[in-house]
Amino acid sequence: MQHSGKEFTSSQEMAGWLGISSAQIRKDLSHFGEFGKQGTGYSVAGLQEKLRQILNIEQEWPIVIIGAGHIGSAVANYTGFAYRGFRVCAVFDSDAQKIGSVIGAHIVRDIAELVPFARESGVRLAMIAVPAESAQVVADLAISAGISAILNYAPINVNVPDGVRVENIDPVLHLQHMTYYLS
Amino acid sequence: MQHSGKEFTSSQEMAGWLGISSAQIRKDLSHFGEFGKQGTGYSVAGLQEKLRQILNIEQEWPIVIIGAGHIGSAVANYTGFAYRGFRVCAVFDSDAQKIGSVIGAHIVRDIAELVPFARESGVRLAMIAVPAESAQVVADLAISAGISAILNYAPINVNVPDGVRVENIDPVLHLQHMTYYLS
DNA sequence: CAGTGTGAAAGTCTTCACAGCT
DNA sequence: AGCTGTGAAGACTTTCACACTG
């Protein structure tokens, strides 16, 4: 909306785009304050700003990527992070063949450097894109280096201590969810 | 569990792995029937079989991938589909540079072939891995070819008619969700 | 006696519907 | 007139706790 120069939007309009109810949108937003004007709706710029505050993305967050295979490379090359508040700051792998090679704007580093790198830079977000059998080991390593949130692409449940958040991206789970609804 | 030769599991054990309550697991499963034995738990093999039935993945589902960029390539090369009941049957792109090139076990086809291909093969699942600005066009095309479920990697909401399901994979949304919880 | 399946209770989320503001 | 913010109602989900079973 901002790109198209729109100044105001309403809960109804947003609901239409997202396929949810306008009441839902108003209720959710009201949880964090009163951002709208009766009769007018929400200021597009103002709402964006508020959402950035709520989501805690006014600062830029560095991320490390662990695993330089197909998925790790794709993610490292993804251009959608920068303008949404994230920045890939390093890519790691354990494969000597890959260490030193270039992926996107990054030189792949040795996984052995992860702990000192993360400790020093204070990075808190990691994306794990390694085979399932290495995911737990790598997660433990990342956590010991001070990582407190993990986005896991490996098709396995990684166990983490309290205080560390994990979210999983597994296309197969989505596909299975959809086939459930296909006769 | 099956790999490690385990024969039975309990709602408590599964709950521990998944970080949810055992009551949740029992309640969810009870929705679809009675699969457990009191005092013993659930047969690992039996439960897997039941879950496959419930999720409708006893058959193998073909998928088409639209977009042969970094993400599309990574997905096309992903080896995790086959043993979980899915099979990539074709990869499409609109870029003349990419059409004809080889990705994984596939030769990239012209997007113009999508409609006849999908109509003829009857494929119902598509993964969209194109830039945000092309996603809606490509989704409409896929739907016109009989696709009824879309897994969308583009960071944009695609609108679809009733009867078509869409799920989105956007790493940034996960990252934003996690930063909300990081002080 | 370990562990399921399940009503009932508690908790959470969504929708309704409208007073009130611009 | 148009649209927000919000109590109250309704719908749905999770947890509790226990009778019952292999």
Image (cartoon, coloured by chain):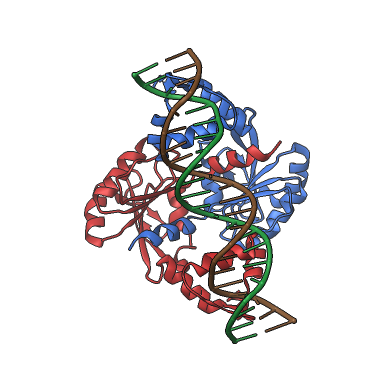
Chain colours: A red, B blue, C green, D brown
Q: Quadrant of the C terminus of chain B?
A: bottom left
Above or below for B18 versus C19: above
Q: Is residue B109 left or right of residue A150?
A: right
Q: Please state which of residues A62 and B183 is positioned toward the viewer in this rendering.
A: B183
Q: Please state which of residues A164 and A105 is positioned toward the viewer in this rendering.
A: A164
Q: Is residue A5 visible?
A: no
Quadrant of the image occupied by residue A24:
bottom right
Q: Is residue B72 visible?
A: yes
Query: How many numbered badges does the structure rendering display?
Result: 0
Q: Is residue B17 left or right of residue D20?
A: left
The residue that appears at 28% across and 43% down in the rendered structure is A140
Where is residue C19 drawn, in percent x and y?
Answer: 62, 76
Where is residue A148 drawn, in percent x and y?
Answer: 31, 54
Q: Is residue B36 left or right of residue A177?
A: left
Where is residue C9 drawn, in percent x and y?
Answer: 48, 43
Q: Please state which of residues D3 and A124 is positioned toward the viewer in this rendering.
A: D3
Quadrant of the image occupied by residue B3:
top left
Where is residue A54 drawn, in percent x and y?
Answer: 43, 68
Q: Please state which of residues A163 and B148 is positioned toward the viewer in this rendering.
A: A163
The residue that appears at 45% across and 54% down in the rendered structure is A75
Above or below for D10 versus A79: above
The residue that appears at 70% across and 41% down in the rendered structure is B124
Above or below for A171 versus B153: above
Q: Quadrant of the N terminus of chain B?
A: top left
